[in-house]
Amino acid sequence: MGVGSGRKRVSVKIYDDIFSWEGWGGVLKLASGRCRLRMFDLSKDEKAKGLTLLKPIIVLVSDVPESPMSIRSCAGHIATQVARQFQIHPHRMVYVEYYPAVRYGTQGERVIPERFETVEFFWVEDKAIRPVWRPLGPPLLDIVKALPEKE
């Protein structure tokens, strides 16, 4: 939803695929992994013509079962490589981790609800360091939830 407008926000999906990141440690490639990466450009919203967005790029990452490393454990490394590979200025993107709802219990009667966490980084020499996680709140939460295919 557009902020306070009640209108559906249009965004352009600029990437939607499995993203592999290289680890560190030379030949051993320690901490390499894979994640689902979706990127959206909110500045392409026709209804937002003339509006300048400070952070128009939404980077939405989620874990994939086949990855040896989690997105949480490698957040800075992933953000650094995404910014570099897609030539995104780090201060123009919002980095969001998505965790889908999980059912558990003997008959799946309990649910851990889905959650979205924004991760803020301190950038030094084009490297994302010192990640800080915060629950994503409205109005950005509403925008991210309206993006197509979170899972």
Image: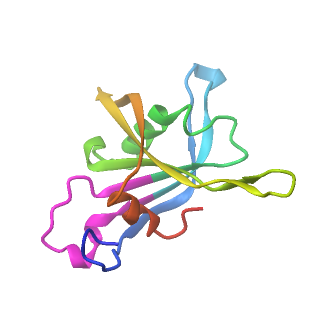
Report the side of 48 relative to 69 (left or right): left
Q: In this orientation, which residue lies closer to the viewer: 138 or 29? A: 138
- Residue 36 horizontal/vertical position (percent): 58, 53
- Classify 132 as above or below 5: above
Name which residue lies at 73% across and 45% down. 66
Asked if one can make out residue 135 in the rendered structure from this viewpoint, the answer is yes
Could you tell me how many numbered marks the image carries? 0
Report if residue 64 lies within the magenta region: no
User: Residue 32, how many percent across, how many down?
Assistant: 61, 33
Q: Which of 130/34 is in front?
A: 130
Q: Which residues are magenta?
A: 39-59
Residue 48's image quarter? Answer: bottom left
Q: Is residue 40 magenta?
A: yes
Residue 126 in sight from this viewpoint = no
Q: Quarter holding the C terminus?
A: bottom right
- Rendered image coloring scheme: rainbow
Q: Outermost residue toward the right?
A: 106
Image quadrant containing the N terminus: bottom left
Q: Is residue 103 above or below residue 5?
A: above
Q: Is residue 28 left or right of residue 74?
A: right
Q: Residue at x 56, y 34 (%)?
A: 22
Q: Residue furthest left?
A: 50
Q: Is residue 104 above or below residue 69?
A: below
Q: Which one is nearer the viewer's eye here, 99 or 64?
A: 99
Residue 27 lies, with reference to residue 21, above or below; the image says above
Compared across the picture, whether 140 is left or right of 150 comes to: left
Residue drawn at (42%, 62%) of the image:
144
Q: Position of residue 110 (x, y in %)?
A: 73, 54
Q: Is residue 140 left or right of residue 23?
A: left
Relative image position of residue 26 (x, y in whole percent):
58, 20
Q: Within the image, what quadrant is residue 45 found in?
A: bottom left
